[in-house]
Image (cartoon, rainbow, N blue to C red):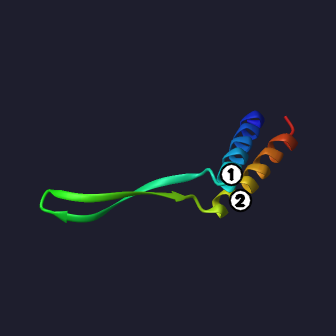
Amino acid sequence: MRAALIIIGIILLGAGAWVVFGHGSYQTTDTLVQIGSAKVTATHDKAVPEWIGVAGIIIGAVIAIGGFLKKG
């Protein structure tokens, strides 16, 4: 259990840092025009909000520290 907490905490720390430093993004597709069965779509890259990365860093740190401090 202790090792699992440490590993999960480190993964969250890494993912949070990835988002904070601007690498986290996702794609959305919007339909611009649709006439019958024909449609025109546009795909946009959107950045993951920075607060999610900060939350991942904080939660990951708390979990990892909890894993290091847990006895047994």
Q: Check the image and report above or below for 31 versus 23.
A: below
Question: x, y percentage for residue 23?
Answer: 62, 50
Which residue is rendered at x = 16% and y = 57% of the image?
38
Q: Between residue 64 and residue 31, name the one nearer to us.
A: 31
Which residue is rendered at x = 79% and y = 52% of the image?
62
Count the marks: 2
Q: Check the image and report above or below for 23 versus 48.
A: above
Q: Of callouts 2 and 1, which one flags the residue occurring earlier in the amino acid sequence?
A: 1
Q: Is residue 64 left or right of residue 51?
A: right
Label 2: state its secondary structure. helix
What is the quadrant of residue 47 in the picture? bottom right
Label 1: few (<14), some or many (≥20) within 10 Å?
many
Q: Residue under circle 2?
A: 54
Q: Residue under circle 1?
A: 16
Q: Between residue 68 and residue 53, name the one nearer to us.
A: 53
On-image quarter of the C terminus: top right
Q: Determine contact: label 2, label 1, CB under 8 Å.
A: yes
Question: x, y percentage for residue 49?
Answer: 60, 62
